[in-house]
Image (spheres, coloured by chain):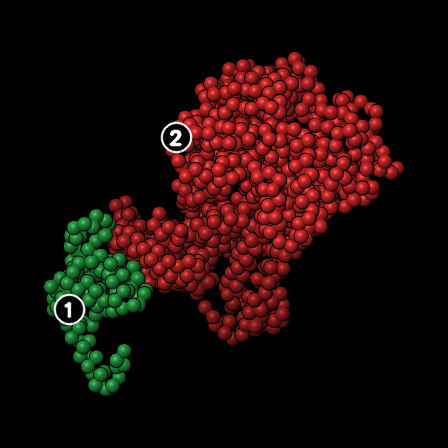
Amino acid sequence: MNAHDFLPLSAPMYAVLITIGDGAMHGLGIIQTFEESTGQSGALLPGSLYNTIARMSKQGLLEEVAPPIGDRDDRKRYYAVTELGRAVRSAESARLRTLLALADRGGLAPSS
Amino acid sequence: MSGGRHAWAVWAYRASLIAFPVDVRRAHGEEMASAFAHLLRAREIQRPVGVIRFLARGIADSVAEGVRERARRATGTDGRRPVRSRAVTGNDEEGMMWSDLKDDVLFTLRGFGRSSGANLVLILTLALGIGASTAVFSVLQGVLLRPLPYEEPGELITVRHEVTAIPNAGLQGIPGPDLLDYIDGTPSIEHLGSVFTLETNLNDDRGAARVTIGWVTPDFFDVLGVHAAAGRMLQRSDWTPRTRAQMEDPTFAPPPMPVMLSHELWSDRFGADPDLLGRSVTINGTQMTVLGIMPVGFKVFAPADASISPRIDAFSYMPLPMTEGQRGAGQGLAIARLSDGADVEQAVSELEQVAATLVERHERHARLGTRVVTAPLLDGVVGQARTFLWVLFGAIAVVLLIAVLNVANLLLVRARHRQQEFAVRITLGVGRGRLIRQLLTESAVLASLGATAGLAVAWVGVDVLVSFAPADLPRLDTVHIDSGVLLFTALTSSVAALMFGVAPALSSTSVDPASMLHARGGVGSGRFGVRVRQGMIVGEIALSVLLVAGAGLLLRSFGELASVEPGYEPSGAVAVELALPFFTYRGLESRQAFFQELIEEASSIPGVTAAGIAPGLPFTARGYAWNGAYGDAGSDVTRDDAARAQYRGASPGFFEALGATLVDGRAFTSTDGLAGTELAVVIDTRMAEIHWPEGVAVGGSLAVQLGAYIGPGRVTTARVVGVVEPVRYASLAEAEPPTIWVPFNETAPLEAALVLRGPGDPVAAAAEVRRILREIDPSAPVYALRRLEDDLRASTSRTRYAMLLMVVFALSALTLAAVGLYGVVASSVQRRTREIGVRIALGALRRNIGSMVLKEAARLAAVGVAAGVLGALITGPVLGTLLYQVAPSDPLTLTLSAAVLGAVALFAAWLPATRASRLDPVHAIRSE
């Protein structure tokens, strides 16, 4: 499947891809990290987040990985971004960057 | 539990996950719920509003996402096979049952998504009905049904004495020597032990604290089957009864006594110090050696009238001697454990045999007319709460029934609209059984959603019910939602689903497809459905009358109670209770001196206009009084047929501080009741009316019997110095017996209450009293600051609680019945649109059309109200003891209830009637 078939990504999907980055995270970790780095609380909620994760796994964008050593809470499942996921993330980032550049050029994007 | 104190929110969130397809829920449901709980905790929201807001966002998110996910799958945008269309499929083969069921559930859920508003109303109706009845059932279960927390609690019975010679004396404890006879004479009873409690002081280097000590006989812990949490239990060999001479000897220094401390006292006061075992503490002025610690949360459950404190901090063996002089009526409560395999009747007949022997052998028992009275311990503990809770449960069950009827009603309307759909499917070969099954599945899904939401309602409801519960309701701390309650909810909602599912399923599938397909909508809608719906409305109205009448009776009772004059002025008065250590204050003079000084000092507290002491306060557990004989001066009041009165103590200043009304003569002075003076008494107006019906009581004299429970009491002649209005102590609902007030100094008991009138700030006044007490004697602690207003209000709390709940239930019932009636009338108008159009076209007056519709509603309402009034007359007596000065068949209440229902019914029918009278005949005749 081609990465471009997934574009444009829904906001939660993109948020998941950029929050996990190159590591592995569990669902609650994604919510907390996203909240910390954006300063927005409640932007991701458990219901939609886990369903998004489930769909992205099915689509091959995420894969479940073994929990890091030391985390004994076996109810938490960890996810990492797959090759396809990385490609989709790059493609979506490039798409957004192009759009943002366009907006900048027209003076339409406030800088902060 | 995850979510901690907001467990209910996590629960509600978890319930909302049902929106997701089952595979998502199975794979991620746990994580979703625990993530939600974590986020909720991390936000540290304090106010419930914040929690609800966060919960609402969470639920909105999962419902929206769940519906989106289902839509993706249904439309195949996820590359998955869409769920096959249900419109014309259906198969009766056995093997298809389960997949059919799954499809039906999915179909139902999608259907719910389409008409969400109407379904939300149905689910909310069910949720409130099921939730409220679950909450009331939780209370019923915790208070009435849950076994007592002892070994084999079914084998425990209370054993008490009834003193038949003294009317209304109440049940009494069994004194030591009698208890020994009962133990010897009852092979069917394995253990028989007794307990009574005393509020007293614990003194250590940190000062004095108020504790409750439980005095037990050697068998008591064997009766309940208790094992020490640390150290060991008391053993028979630890018991050294005292002689009466020792007890009364002011120089006697008692040897250390063995004591068990409650786990709570051990943790709170001694920091759960394991080294405390074997050390000694001072309780009740006596050195006591700590032998062991009771199990966590150990409580002695006892009937309310046995005056056993529920929280006992320390247990020791009764120091009292078991001498012959004590026979008759004693303190506290005896509990027996039946031997293995013995039956209750055998044990009771053995006890009665012993009681008969006691009456034969002991003159005192013969004089008192002693009888033994037994009851299962749980019955005694629950007491009057039984009727009260069953009445409330019955009322909420009626509300639930009305809710279910309403849902059935709405489903019948819906089924009518779907008859054409069913006709098509029957034509296409779908069996009727299959359609009925689908409709029943819909009902089941509806009931499950209602039950799930209802549990959230119940969770909150239990908290509300418990926190507003009357203070005298026992065992409230065992009320919670447990597996038994969940089972109740499951059963209730299943029965509900059948009740509201069957009628619509039968009526809407009993169609003749041929006529149905040809007919224009509404014509072939079947008399069956209409009749059933009308019957349901009549039932709803009748049941509502029951509840409205019940609420009305309770409202009137409460109004009557609230208008009773208590005979004193509770506002502006505060009281502090205190207890003197026994061994320090064994002598009467030492107590008299202590209290005299206390009253004088307390009277000089700034703002205090009057201060006085009495052994007990109105409407408290310790409203201490005794029942004794009286008669003309010089008459023999020890005769069995002597007249009886209630005796109470009061100090100088007490009547004034209490706000009692002095009608004639004077109140007590500080010299009344001291040795060597003629005994002065104050009587109440009831006593004055009985003994001096025409003359003047003040100055008259009476023969009185003081301290009648211990021995024959002291008989003396007393001079009446004053007359007061009766003061209600025990119950607003019942007048006190004729009362003789004796000077407090006469007995000056160890436990007493100081009443202050006038201090602006009660807390500051209590601090002042504490300071005064520290100066007089630092070992006497002050406890329990009370406002007399609070105690009076608490005395009516059960009636108030029942009344408030009944009013809420009745309003819910009225609303539901009104909505139901509106639905029936509105749909009847809709069904008859063409007929009405034709009538108007043919010249019928519009107002006649309106009144025709109203008449139809009025007919239903009249039948319902008549049935309801009849039902109220039949069920009214169950309210029994909750009513005051109002008969269950009170005509005014019943008439008003009927009128309220009639008015609500006509109001509900008004809108559809108006609509019918305004129909445009042209449109109406063309309408489908």
In front: B557, or B125? Answer: B557
**Residue B903 sits above or below residue B755 on the image:** below
Residue at which label 2 appears: B230
Q: Nearer the viewer, residue B504 or B125?
A: B125
User: What color was chain A assigned in the picture?
Assistant: green
**Can residue B797 be seen in the rendering of this structure?**
no
Could you tell me which secondary element the residue under label 1 belongs to? helix
Up/down of B124 relative to B189, above or below: below
Tell me residue B48's x, y (percent): 44, 58
Q: Quadrant of residue B905?
A: bottom right
Q: Which chain is red?
A: B
C-alpha separation, residue under disc 2 versus residue under disc 1: 66 Å
Residue shown at the point (80%, 22%) measured from the top left: B636
Q: Give percent across and percent down for residue B800.
A: 61, 48
Q: Chain of mark 2?
A: B
Q: Residue furthest bottom?
A: A106
Identify the residue at horizontal 68%, vertical 31% (top origin): B589
CB under 8 Å between discs 2 and 1 = no
Q: Tell me if residue B928 comes above or below residue A77 in the rendering.
A: below
User: Is residue B555 toward the left or the right of residue B116 in the image?
Assistant: right
Crowding near the residue tagged with mark 2, few <14, some 14–19, many ≥20 C-alpha atoms within 10 Å = some
For the C terminus of chain B, give its image quadrant.
bottom left
- The amino acid marked with disc number 2 is Ala
Residue A9 falls in image quadrant: bottom left
Kindly identify which residue carries mark 1: A88
Chain that bears disc 1:
A
What residue is at 73 percent from the left and 46 percent from the top? B656
Viewer-proximal residue, B646 or B261?
B261
Which residue is pictured at 80% across the width and 31% down the height? B678
